[in-house]
Image (cartoon, rainbow, N blue to C red):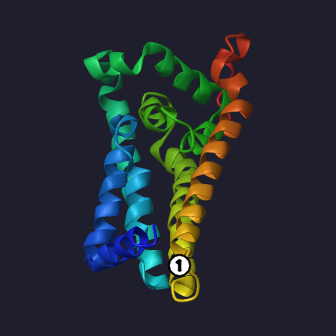
Amino acid sequence: MNDFVPWLIEFMRSIDPIARTLLAGLAVLLETSILIGLVFPGDTVVLVASIGITSPLEGVAMVIAVVVGALIGESIGFGLGRWVGPHIRASWIGRRVGEHNWVRAERYLARRGGIAIFLSRFLPVLHSLVPLTVGMSHYSYRRFLAWTAPACLLWATAYVSITSLAVGSFDELADQVHFAGYIFVGIIVVFLLLVLLSKKVIARVERHHLDSDDAEAGADVKD
């Protein structure tokens, strides 16, 4: 571990910062557009790319690139939902997603409105379906952005800042303790476990709005 971590950090730092930042933004764009996020691990790319950050300026640039990439990707999903959403839903890939997941996304948006857009960024499957679902609804693009932008910013800031903290801790301790690599890995693992726990908590708290079939399904959309 103490050999692998220094190698990984140096390798990521050897990549041109601009190229590394743009790659992370592109990865998130792909992850958040249409249904690619169901199979493409954009958050993993952001985490790995952030390992190479060497200054606050690079960190800020990474957050901006990731947020912009996420917003472009979700905007593509929204636009496709507005123009050809029903066709995507009826397509082969739409059927592979499962009709029950489309229904859950529609129900969640109908019951929670903007809150559903915000929280879907942190929920499996829904983070790819909700932009399309919102595009097929009466929601305006401006209202969609108003809810999804803060979620994207929170998500990007968390991944970039925690990874930068782990790398900074390693840099400070590498010459002092022999287990600095394990500290780096420990910080990343704890963060990922917290992310997983947070998703489970959100899913549990929102379960009623996602899965219940009572009369609330026809409730008015909340702002």
Residue 199 locus on image (x, y percent): 62, 41
Q: Count neighbours of disc 1 (C-alpha within 10 A) and say few if under 14, some if 14 to 19, many if 20 or more.
A: many
* Three-letter residue code for mark 1: Phe
Quadrant showing the N terminus: bottom left
Left or right of 60? Residue 85 is left
Q: Quadrant of residue 106?
A: top right
Residue indicated by mark 1:
170
- Which of the pair 191/180 is nearer the observer? 180
Please determine whether, in this image, residue 36 is positioned above or below residue 57. above
Residue placed farthest to the top in the image?
214
User: At 36% across and 48% down in the image, what residue appears?
Assistant: 73
For image coordinates 47% across by 21% down, the residue present is 102
Q: Looking at this rendering, what residue extends furthest in the bottom direction?
A: 175
Point out the image quarter for the C terminus.
Answer: top right
- Up the image or down, 57 lies above or below 132; here it is below
Q: Secondary structure at mark 1?
A: helix
Quarter of the image for residue 120 reads: top right
- Taking the spot 49% from the left edge, 40% from the top edge, the residue there is 140
Question: Where is residue 2 shown, x and y percent of the image?
Answer: 46, 72
* Above/below status of 56 relative to 41: below
